[in-house]
Amino acid sequence: MKNSNDIETKSEREKNAANTRGASSLLGPTVKQHMASGRALRQKVPRTSHAEWKPAPNRPDPVELLKESDRGRLPELLPIRYARMRRSPFGFFRGAAALMAFDLARTPTTGIRVQACGDCHVLNFGGFGSPERRLVFDINDFDETLPAPWEWDLKRLATSIVLAGGDRGESSRQCADTVRQMMASYREHMRAYARMRAIDAWYSHIDAEVLVYEAKTASDKKRWEQIEQQARWQTAEHIFPRIADVEKGYIRIIDKPPLMYHPRNYGKASKHVRDMFHRYTLTLPEERRVILDRYKIVDIARKVVGVGSVGTRCAVVLMMAGKNDPLFLQFKEAHASVLHPYTAKSRYQNQGERVVTGQRMLQSASDVFLGWTRDEQGHDYYFRQLRDMKMSVPLEQMTKTSWLEYVEVCGWVLARAHARTGDAAQIGGYAGKKDTVDRAIAKFAILYAEQTERDHEALVKAIKSGRLRASNDALA
Protein backbone atom coordinates (compact mmCIF):
# COMPACT_ATOMS: atom_id res chain seq x y z
CA MET A 1 0.00 0.00 0.00
CA LYS A 2 1.26 3.51 -0.86
CA ASN A 3 1.55 5.99 1.96
CA SER A 4 0.02 9.46 2.04
CA ASN A 5 3.27 11.08 0.94
CA ASP A 6 3.23 8.95 -2.21
CA ILE A 7 -0.39 9.95 -2.89
CA GLU A 8 0.43 13.63 -2.40
CA THR A 9 3.43 13.37 -4.68
CA LYS A 10 1.36 11.80 -7.43
CA SER A 11 -1.32 14.42 -6.94
CA GLU A 12 1.23 17.19 -7.20
CA ARG A 13 2.64 15.66 -10.38
CA GLU A 14 -0.80 15.50 -11.94
CA LYS A 15 -1.51 19.07 -10.90
CA ASN A 16 1.79 20.28 -12.36
CA ALA A 17 1.13 18.39 -15.59
CA ALA A 18 -2.30 19.96 -15.85
CA ASN A 19 -0.82 23.40 -15.23
CA THR A 20 1.77 22.76 -17.94
CA ARG A 21 -0.92 21.69 -20.40
CA GLY A 22 -2.91 24.78 -19.54
CA ALA A 23 0.11 27.04 -20.02
CA SER A 24 0.87 25.35 -23.38
CA SER A 25 -2.67 25.93 -24.57
CA LEU A 26 -2.40 29.60 -23.64
CA LEU A 27 0.92 29.89 -25.49
CA GLY A 28 -0.36 28.17 -28.60
CA PRO A 29 0.81 24.98 -30.35
CA THR A 30 4.10 23.40 -29.33
CA VAL A 31 7.07 22.92 -31.66
CA LYS A 32 6.01 19.30 -32.08
CA GLN A 33 2.50 20.40 -33.08
CA HIS A 34 3.85 22.99 -35.51
CA MET A 35 6.02 20.31 -37.13
CA ALA A 36 2.99 18.04 -37.37
CA SER A 37 0.98 20.77 -39.09
CA GLY A 38 3.87 21.18 -41.53
CA ARG A 39 3.86 17.46 -42.30
CA ALA A 40 0.10 17.64 -42.83
CA LEU A 41 0.63 20.21 -45.59
CA ARG A 42 2.24 17.48 -47.69
CA GLN A 43 -1.24 16.14 -48.38
CA LYS A 44 -2.28 19.43 -49.94
CA VAL A 45 1.09 20.28 -51.55
CA PRO A 46 3.19 17.15 -52.09
CA ARG A 47 6.90 17.84 -51.75
CA THR A 48 7.48 16.33 -55.18
CA SER A 49 5.25 19.04 -56.69
CA HIS A 50 8.07 21.57 -56.24
CA ALA A 51 9.86 19.91 -59.16
CA GLU A 52 7.23 21.23 -61.56
CA TRP A 53 8.05 23.91 -64.09
CA LYS A 54 6.21 24.77 -67.27
CA PRO A 55 5.82 28.28 -68.72
CA ALA A 56 2.35 29.71 -68.21
CA PRO A 57 0.29 30.24 -71.40
CA ASN A 58 0.15 33.96 -70.64
CA ARG A 59 3.88 34.24 -69.85
CA PRO A 60 5.02 37.64 -71.18
CA ASP A 61 7.75 38.16 -73.74
CA PRO A 62 10.88 38.32 -71.51
CA VAL A 63 12.22 41.35 -73.37
CA GLU A 64 8.98 43.27 -72.94
CA LEU A 65 8.84 42.44 -69.24
CA LEU A 66 12.42 43.68 -68.83
CA LYS A 67 11.52 46.91 -70.59
CA GLU A 68 8.52 47.27 -68.30
CA SER A 69 10.76 46.83 -65.24
CA ASP A 70 13.04 49.60 -66.58
CA ARG A 71 10.40 52.26 -65.95
CA GLY A 72 11.77 54.93 -63.66
CA ARG A 73 15.41 54.02 -64.30
CA LEU A 74 17.93 56.41 -65.81
CA PRO A 75 17.79 55.68 -69.57
CA GLU A 76 21.44 56.58 -70.18
CA LEU A 77 22.53 53.70 -67.92
CA LEU A 78 20.31 50.99 -69.39
CA PRO A 79 22.82 50.00 -72.12
CA ILE A 80 25.22 49.03 -69.31
CA ARG A 81 22.51 46.91 -67.72
CA TYR A 82 21.84 45.02 -70.96
CA ALA A 83 25.53 44.60 -71.73
CA ARG A 84 25.95 42.87 -68.37
CA MET A 85 22.90 40.69 -68.91
CA ARG A 86 24.12 39.73 -72.39
CA ARG A 87 27.32 38.17 -71.04
CA SER A 88 25.80 34.88 -69.89
CA PRO A 89 22.54 33.23 -68.81
CA PHE A 90 23.59 33.82 -65.19
CA GLY A 91 24.15 37.51 -65.94
CA PHE A 92 20.69 37.62 -67.50
CA PHE A 93 19.21 35.85 -64.48
CA ARG A 94 20.66 38.42 -62.08
CA GLY A 95 18.91 41.22 -63.95
CA ALA A 96 15.62 39.37 -64.49
CA ALA A 97 14.21 39.04 -60.97
CA ALA A 98 10.92 40.51 -62.20
CA LEU A 99 10.56 37.74 -64.79
CA MET A 100 11.22 34.99 -62.26
CA ALA A 101 8.79 36.59 -59.79
CA PHE A 102 6.06 36.24 -62.44
CA ASP A 103 6.99 32.58 -62.91
CA LEU A 104 7.34 31.72 -59.21
CA ALA A 105 3.87 33.11 -58.53
CA ARG A 106 2.53 30.24 -60.65
CA THR A 107 4.36 27.43 -58.83
CA PRO A 108 3.05 25.35 -55.88
CA THR A 109 3.43 26.84 -52.38
CA THR A 110 2.52 25.63 -48.91
CA GLY A 111 1.17 29.00 -47.83
CA ILE A 112 3.87 29.45 -45.17
CA ARG A 113 5.29 32.97 -45.45
CA VAL A 114 8.56 34.50 -44.38
CA GLN A 115 10.22 37.84 -44.93
CA ALA A 116 11.72 36.87 -48.29
CA CYS A 117 14.94 38.27 -49.71
CA GLY A 118 13.18 38.43 -53.09
CA ASP A 119 16.39 38.25 -55.13
CA CYS A 120 18.12 35.31 -53.51
CA HIS A 121 21.07 34.19 -55.64
CA VAL A 122 24.60 33.03 -54.84
CA LEU A 123 26.18 36.45 -55.46
CA ASN A 124 23.78 38.13 -53.02
CA PHE A 125 25.54 36.47 -50.09
CA GLY A 126 28.82 37.62 -48.63
CA GLY A 127 30.76 38.98 -45.71
CA PHE A 128 30.53 42.41 -44.13
CA GLY A 129 31.41 44.16 -40.87
CA SER A 130 28.97 44.01 -37.95
CA PRO A 131 28.62 46.96 -35.54
CA GLU A 132 30.89 44.99 -33.19
CA ARG A 133 33.42 44.77 -36.07
CA ARG A 134 33.05 41.04 -36.54
CA LEU A 135 33.20 39.78 -40.11
CA VAL A 136 29.85 38.04 -40.53
CA PHE A 137 28.49 36.07 -43.48
CA ASP A 138 24.91 36.79 -44.50
CA ILE A 139 22.50 37.82 -47.24
CA ASN A 140 23.58 41.25 -48.48
CA ASP A 141 20.94 42.49 -50.94
CA PHE A 142 17.38 43.37 -49.99
CA ASP A 143 16.05 45.59 -52.77
CA GLU A 144 13.21 43.12 -53.44
CA THR A 145 12.44 42.03 -49.87
CA LEU A 146 8.80 41.46 -48.99
CA PRO A 147 6.74 38.86 -47.08
CA ALA A 148 6.33 35.92 -49.48
CA PRO A 149 6.39 32.09 -49.68
CA TRP A 150 9.60 30.57 -48.33
CA GLU A 151 9.85 28.35 -51.42
CA TRP A 152 10.46 31.35 -53.72
CA ASP A 153 13.82 32.28 -52.20
CA LEU A 154 14.93 28.65 -52.28
CA LYS A 155 13.98 28.14 -55.91
CA ARG A 156 15.78 31.32 -56.99
CA LEU A 157 18.88 30.37 -55.01
CA ALA A 158 18.79 26.83 -56.43
CA THR A 159 18.50 28.08 -60.01
CA SER A 160 21.40 30.48 -59.50
CA ILE A 161 23.54 27.56 -58.34
CA VAL A 162 22.79 25.72 -61.58
CA LEU A 163 23.56 28.76 -63.74
CA ALA A 164 26.72 29.63 -61.83
CA GLY A 165 27.72 25.99 -62.04
CA GLY A 166 27.28 26.15 -65.81
CA ASP A 167 29.68 29.10 -65.89
CA ARG A 168 32.09 26.93 -63.91
CA GLY A 169 31.88 24.20 -66.55
CA GLU A 170 29.82 21.75 -64.51
CA SER A 171 27.33 19.29 -66.02
CA SER A 172 23.62 19.35 -65.22
CA ARG A 173 24.05 16.31 -63.01
CA GLN A 174 26.84 17.98 -61.03
CA CYS A 175 24.75 21.14 -60.67
CA ALA A 176 21.78 19.13 -59.40
CA ASP A 177 24.02 17.44 -56.83
CA THR A 178 25.24 20.86 -55.66
CA VAL A 179 21.67 22.13 -55.30
CA ARG A 180 20.83 19.09 -53.18
CA GLN A 181 23.78 19.91 -50.91
CA MET A 182 22.45 23.43 -50.40
CA MET A 183 18.91 22.15 -49.82
CA ALA A 184 20.05 19.58 -47.25
CA SER A 185 21.87 22.33 -45.38
CA TYR A 186 18.76 24.57 -45.43
CA ARG A 187 16.45 21.78 -44.34
CA GLU A 188 18.65 20.46 -41.51
CA HIS A 189 19.43 23.90 -40.12
CA MET A 190 15.78 24.92 -40.31
CA ARG A 191 14.82 21.96 -38.13
CA ALA A 192 17.59 22.92 -35.70
CA TYR A 193 16.34 26.53 -35.50
CA ALA A 194 12.83 25.22 -34.86
CA ARG A 195 14.02 23.58 -31.63
CA MET A 196 15.83 26.69 -30.37
CA ARG A 197 14.36 29.25 -28.05
CA ALA A 198 12.93 32.04 -30.19
CA ILE A 199 15.37 34.59 -28.79
CA ASP A 200 18.36 32.30 -29.43
CA ALA A 201 17.34 31.81 -33.05
CA TRP A 202 17.04 35.59 -33.42
CA TYR A 203 20.47 36.24 -31.89
CA SER A 204 22.22 33.52 -33.89
CA HIS A 205 24.79 34.68 -36.42
CA ILE A 206 27.30 33.08 -38.76
CA ASP A 207 30.84 34.43 -38.69
CA ALA A 208 32.66 34.42 -42.02
CA GLU A 209 35.36 32.28 -40.39
CA VAL A 210 33.00 29.34 -40.84
CA LEU A 211 34.26 29.11 -44.43
CA VAL A 212 37.78 28.58 -43.07
CA TYR A 213 36.69 26.08 -40.42
CA GLU A 214 34.65 24.05 -42.90
CA ALA A 215 37.33 24.02 -45.61
CA LYS A 216 38.08 20.47 -46.76
CA THR A 217 41.64 21.06 -47.98
CA ALA A 218 44.64 23.12 -46.84
CA SER A 219 44.60 25.12 -50.09
CA ASP A 220 40.88 25.94 -49.67
CA LYS A 221 41.52 27.04 -46.10
CA LYS A 222 44.38 29.30 -47.18
CA ARG A 223 42.26 30.85 -49.96
CA TRP A 224 39.35 31.60 -47.58
CA GLU A 225 41.80 33.15 -45.11
CA GLN A 226 43.12 35.42 -47.88
CA ILE A 227 39.58 36.46 -48.91
CA GLU A 228 38.68 37.26 -45.31
CA GLN A 229 41.87 39.25 -44.77
CA GLN A 230 41.16 41.30 -47.88
CA ALA A 231 37.65 42.01 -46.55
CA ARG A 232 39.01 43.31 -43.25
CA TRP A 233 40.89 45.95 -45.23
CA GLN A 234 37.71 47.13 -46.94
CA THR A 235 37.13 50.03 -44.56
CA ALA A 236 36.86 53.75 -45.24
CA GLU A 237 40.41 54.59 -44.21
CA HIS A 238 41.87 51.88 -46.44
CA ILE A 239 39.72 52.38 -49.55
CA PHE A 240 40.02 56.19 -49.32
CA PRO A 241 43.38 56.43 -51.17
CA ARG A 242 42.04 54.20 -53.96
CA ILE A 243 38.84 56.05 -54.75
CA ALA A 244 39.60 59.65 -53.74
CA ASP A 245 42.33 62.19 -54.44
CA VAL A 246 43.16 65.88 -54.06
CA GLU A 247 42.17 67.97 -57.08
CA LYS A 248 42.89 71.72 -57.13
CA GLY A 249 43.19 71.71 -53.38
CA TYR A 250 39.90 69.84 -52.82
CA ILE A 251 39.37 66.20 -51.89
CA ARG A 252 37.38 64.55 -54.67
CA ILE A 253 36.14 61.08 -55.59
CA ILE A 254 38.07 59.85 -58.63
CA ASP A 255 35.97 59.69 -61.80
CA LYS A 256 35.91 56.26 -63.47
CA PRO A 257 33.21 56.60 -66.13
CA PRO A 258 30.80 55.07 -66.84
CA LEU A 259 30.74 53.36 -63.42
CA MET A 260 31.67 56.31 -61.18
CA TYR A 261 31.36 59.94 -62.25
CA HIS A 262 30.34 63.42 -61.16
CA PRO A 263 27.02 64.67 -62.53
CA ARG A 264 27.23 67.49 -65.08
CA ASN A 265 25.03 69.82 -63.02
CA TYR A 266 27.07 69.20 -59.89
CA GLY A 267 25.94 72.29 -57.97
CA LYS A 268 22.25 71.46 -58.28
CA ALA A 269 22.88 67.76 -57.61
CA SER A 270 24.94 68.59 -54.53
CA LYS A 271 22.15 70.68 -52.99
CA HIS A 272 19.65 67.94 -53.85
CA VAL A 273 21.75 65.31 -52.03
CA ARG A 274 22.41 67.52 -49.00
CA ASP A 275 18.68 68.10 -48.59
CA MET A 276 18.08 64.34 -48.88
CA PHE A 277 20.86 63.64 -46.41
CA HIS A 278 19.26 65.86 -43.77
CA ARG A 279 15.95 64.02 -44.10
CA TYR A 280 17.73 60.65 -44.03
CA THR A 281 19.44 61.42 -40.71
CA LEU A 282 16.03 61.92 -39.10
CA THR A 283 15.33 58.19 -39.61
CA LEU A 284 18.39 57.25 -37.53
CA PRO A 285 18.46 56.82 -33.75
CA GLU A 286 19.77 59.95 -32.09
CA GLU A 287 23.11 58.43 -31.04
CA ARG A 288 23.88 57.64 -34.71
CA ARG A 289 23.07 61.22 -35.69
CA VAL A 290 25.59 62.36 -33.07
CA ILE A 291 28.28 60.40 -34.94
CA LEU A 292 27.29 61.72 -38.37
CA ASP A 293 27.23 65.30 -37.07
CA ARG A 294 31.01 65.07 -36.75
CA TYR A 295 31.36 64.52 -40.50
CA LYS A 296 30.93 67.03 -43.30
CA ILE A 297 29.98 66.21 -46.90
CA VAL A 298 32.95 67.03 -49.15
CA ASP A 299 32.01 65.28 -52.42
CA ILE A 300 29.28 63.34 -54.21
CA ALA A 301 29.54 61.09 -57.27
CA ARG A 302 27.09 58.88 -59.11
CA LYS A 303 27.78 55.15 -59.01
CA VAL A 304 26.59 52.27 -61.19
CA VAL A 305 25.80 49.23 -59.05
CA GLY A 306 24.94 45.53 -59.55
CA VAL A 307 23.20 44.07 -62.60
CA GLY A 308 19.70 44.10 -61.15
CA SER A 309 19.99 47.74 -60.03
CA VAL A 310 21.72 49.36 -62.99
CA GLY A 311 19.75 52.44 -63.97
CA THR A 312 18.48 53.22 -60.48
CA ARG A 313 19.67 56.47 -58.95
CA CYS A 314 22.70 55.66 -56.85
CA ALA A 315 25.58 57.76 -55.55
CA VAL A 316 28.50 57.78 -53.15
CA VAL A 317 28.86 60.51 -50.55
CA LEU A 318 32.36 61.23 -49.21
CA MET A 319 32.34 62.72 -45.72
CA MET A 320 35.27 63.86 -43.59
CA ALA A 321 35.60 64.46 -39.85
CA GLY A 322 39.26 65.37 -40.19
CA LYS A 323 42.25 65.10 -42.53
CA ASN A 324 42.57 61.33 -42.07
CA ASP A 325 39.05 60.54 -40.99
CA PRO A 326 36.87 59.67 -44.03
CA LEU A 327 33.46 58.03 -44.16
CA PHE A 328 31.79 56.79 -47.33
CA LEU A 329 28.02 56.46 -47.50
CA GLN A 330 26.10 55.11 -50.47
CA PHE A 331 22.50 55.92 -51.22
CA LYS A 332 20.45 53.89 -53.62
CA GLU A 333 17.01 54.35 -55.11
CA ALA A 334 14.39 51.83 -54.01
CA HIS A 335 11.54 50.86 -56.34
CA ALA A 336 8.59 48.64 -55.48
CA SER A 337 9.61 45.01 -54.99
CA VAL A 338 9.33 42.70 -58.00
CA LEU A 339 7.26 40.46 -55.69
CA HIS A 340 4.72 43.20 -55.09
CA PRO A 341 2.21 42.16 -57.82
CA TYR A 342 2.09 38.59 -56.50
CA THR A 343 2.03 38.87 -52.72
CA ALA A 344 0.76 41.04 -49.89
CA LYS A 345 1.06 44.77 -50.40
CA SER A 346 3.92 46.39 -48.49
CA ARG A 347 2.70 48.35 -45.48
CA TYR A 348 5.51 50.86 -45.95
CA GLN A 349 4.78 54.02 -47.90
CA ASN A 350 8.49 54.58 -48.50
CA GLN A 351 10.23 51.83 -50.48
CA GLY A 352 13.51 52.69 -48.80
CA GLU A 353 11.97 51.99 -45.41
CA ARG A 354 10.69 48.65 -46.78
CA VAL A 355 14.23 47.69 -47.79
CA VAL A 356 15.81 48.84 -44.51
CA THR A 357 13.23 47.11 -42.32
CA GLY A 358 13.44 43.89 -44.34
CA GLN A 359 17.21 43.95 -44.05
CA ARG A 360 17.05 44.38 -40.28
CA MET A 361 14.61 41.46 -40.07
CA LEU A 362 16.74 39.10 -42.12
CA GLN A 363 20.33 39.99 -41.24
CA SER A 364 21.92 38.95 -37.97
CA ALA A 365 23.67 42.35 -37.85
CA SER A 366 23.06 45.40 -40.00
CA ASP A 367 24.92 48.58 -40.84
CA VAL A 368 24.56 51.20 -38.09
CA PHE A 369 23.91 53.88 -40.72
CA LEU A 370 20.99 52.15 -42.46
CA GLY A 371 18.24 54.70 -43.05
CA TRP A 372 15.87 55.98 -45.70
CA THR A 373 14.50 59.14 -47.27
CA ARG A 374 12.54 60.57 -50.20
CA ASP A 375 13.53 63.39 -52.54
CA GLU A 376 11.42 66.28 -53.84
CA GLN A 377 10.54 64.33 -57.00
CA GLY A 378 9.07 61.47 -54.98
CA HIS A 379 11.94 58.98 -55.45
CA ASP A 380 12.59 56.74 -52.45
CA TYR A 381 16.11 55.88 -51.26
CA TYR A 382 18.03 54.06 -48.56
CA PHE A 383 21.48 54.87 -47.19
CA ARG A 384 24.24 52.62 -45.90
CA GLN A 385 28.02 52.55 -45.63
CA LEU A 386 30.00 51.79 -48.78
CA ARG A 387 31.90 48.49 -48.82
CA ASP A 388 32.33 48.26 -45.06
CA MET A 389 34.49 45.12 -44.67
CA LYS A 390 32.79 43.76 -47.79
CA MET A 391 33.89 40.22 -48.60
CA SER A 392 33.55 39.49 -52.31
CA VAL A 393 33.39 35.83 -53.27
CA PRO A 394 35.01 34.94 -56.64
CA LEU A 395 32.87 32.01 -57.78
CA GLU A 396 34.96 31.28 -60.86
CA GLN A 397 38.11 30.78 -58.77
CA MET A 398 36.61 28.28 -56.31
CA THR A 399 37.66 24.67 -56.25
CA LYS A 400 34.93 22.04 -56.35
CA THR A 401 35.19 21.49 -52.60
CA SER A 402 35.10 25.20 -51.71
CA TRP A 403 32.11 25.71 -54.04
CA LEU A 404 30.17 22.96 -52.25
CA GLU A 405 31.16 24.44 -48.90
CA TYR A 406 30.02 27.88 -50.02
CA VAL A 407 26.55 26.78 -51.18
CA GLU A 408 26.04 24.78 -47.98
CA VAL A 409 26.74 27.91 -45.94
CA CYS A 410 24.34 29.87 -48.18
CA GLY A 411 21.64 27.31 -47.39
CA TRP A 412 22.40 27.67 -43.70
CA VAL A 413 22.25 31.46 -43.87
CA LEU A 414 18.92 31.40 -45.71
CA ALA A 415 17.46 29.01 -43.12
CA ARG A 416 18.55 31.34 -40.32
CA ALA A 417 17.02 34.36 -42.11
CA HIS A 418 13.72 32.58 -42.74
CA ALA A 419 13.62 31.23 -39.16
CA ARG A 420 13.76 34.80 -37.83
CA THR A 421 10.50 35.80 -39.50
CA GLY A 422 8.66 32.56 -40.37
CA ASP A 423 7.46 29.38 -38.69
CA ALA A 424 10.67 27.35 -38.61
CA ALA A 425 8.96 24.31 -37.08
CA GLN A 426 6.22 24.22 -39.71
CA ILE A 427 8.73 24.61 -42.55
CA GLY A 428 10.99 22.01 -40.93
CA GLY A 429 8.09 19.60 -40.46
CA TYR A 430 7.03 20.00 -44.07
CA ALA A 431 10.57 19.59 -45.46
CA GLY A 432 11.21 16.58 -43.20
CA LYS A 433 14.30 14.48 -42.58
CA LYS A 434 14.52 12.85 -46.01
CA ASP A 435 15.78 14.49 -49.20
CA THR A 436 12.43 14.47 -51.04
CA VAL A 437 12.11 18.26 -51.24
CA ASP A 438 15.85 18.59 -51.99
CA ARG A 439 15.49 16.47 -55.11
CA ALA A 440 12.32 18.23 -56.21
CA ILE A 441 13.81 21.72 -56.04
CA ALA A 442 17.00 20.50 -57.73
CA LYS A 443 14.86 19.25 -60.63
CA PHE A 444 13.01 22.58 -60.76
CA ALA A 445 16.34 24.44 -60.81
CA ILE A 446 17.59 22.47 -63.81
CA LEU A 447 14.36 23.08 -65.73
CA TYR A 448 14.23 26.77 -64.86
CA ALA A 449 17.90 27.24 -65.75
CA GLU A 450 17.06 25.87 -69.20
CA GLN A 451 14.22 28.40 -69.41
CA THR A 452 16.66 31.15 -68.44
CA GLU A 453 18.99 30.10 -71.24
CA ARG A 454 16.11 30.48 -73.71
CA ASP A 455 15.23 33.90 -72.25
CA HIS A 456 18.87 34.94 -72.50
CA GLU A 457 18.87 34.00 -76.17
CA ALA A 458 15.83 36.23 -76.65
CA LEU A 459 17.72 39.11 -75.07
CA VAL A 460 20.77 38.56 -77.30
CA LYS A 461 18.54 38.57 -80.39
CA ALA A 462 16.79 41.76 -79.21
CA ILE A 463 20.18 43.49 -78.86
CA LYS A 464 21.35 42.31 -82.29
CA SER A 465 18.13 43.52 -83.90
CA GLY A 466 18.37 46.94 -82.23
CA ARG A 467 15.29 46.37 -80.10
CA LEU A 468 17.48 46.94 -77.05
CA ARG A 469 20.76 48.84 -76.87
CA ALA A 470 23.80 47.45 -75.04
CA SER A 471 26.95 49.40 -74.25
CA ASN A 472 30.17 48.34 -75.95
CA ASP A 473 32.26 50.00 -73.27
CA ALA A 474 34.75 47.52 -71.84
CA LEU A 475 34.03 48.75 -68.33
CA ALA A 476 30.31 48.05 -68.61
Image: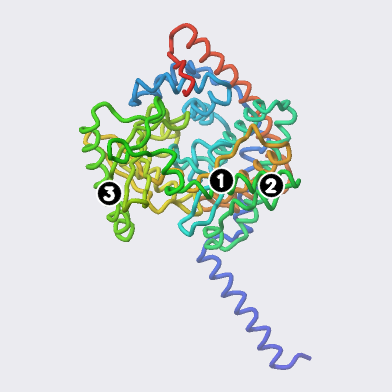
Task: State which quadrant residue 266 falls in.
Answer: top left
Q: Which mark is residue 167?
A: none
**Residue extending furthest toward the front:** 248
Say whether disc 3 or disc 2 marks the residue closer to the N-terminus.
Answer: 2
Decide: is 20 above or below 329: below
Separation of residues labelled 1 and 2 (CA atoms): 12 Å
In terms of depth relative to the viewer, which is nearer, 280 or 238?
Answer: 238
**Residue extending furthest toward the right:** 1
- Circle 3 residues within 10 Å: few <14, some 14–19, many ≥20: some
Q: Which mark is residue 296?
A: 3
Query: Dot 2 corresponds to which residue?
Result: 222
Type of the residue with mark 1: Gln
Type of the residue with mark 3: Lys
Decide: is 170 above or below 294: above
Query: Dot 1 corresponds to which residue?
Result: 230
Place of residue 307 in the rendered image (x, y in percent of width and height, measured from the top left): 47, 28
Q: Residue at x 39, y 26 (%)?
A: 257
Q: Is residue 150 visible?
A: yes
Element class at badge 1: helix
Separation of residues labelled 3 and 2 (CA atoms): 40 Å
Q: Residue at x 49, y 52 (%)?
A: 129
Place of residue 451 in the rendered image (x, y in percent of width and height, measured from the top left): 60, 21
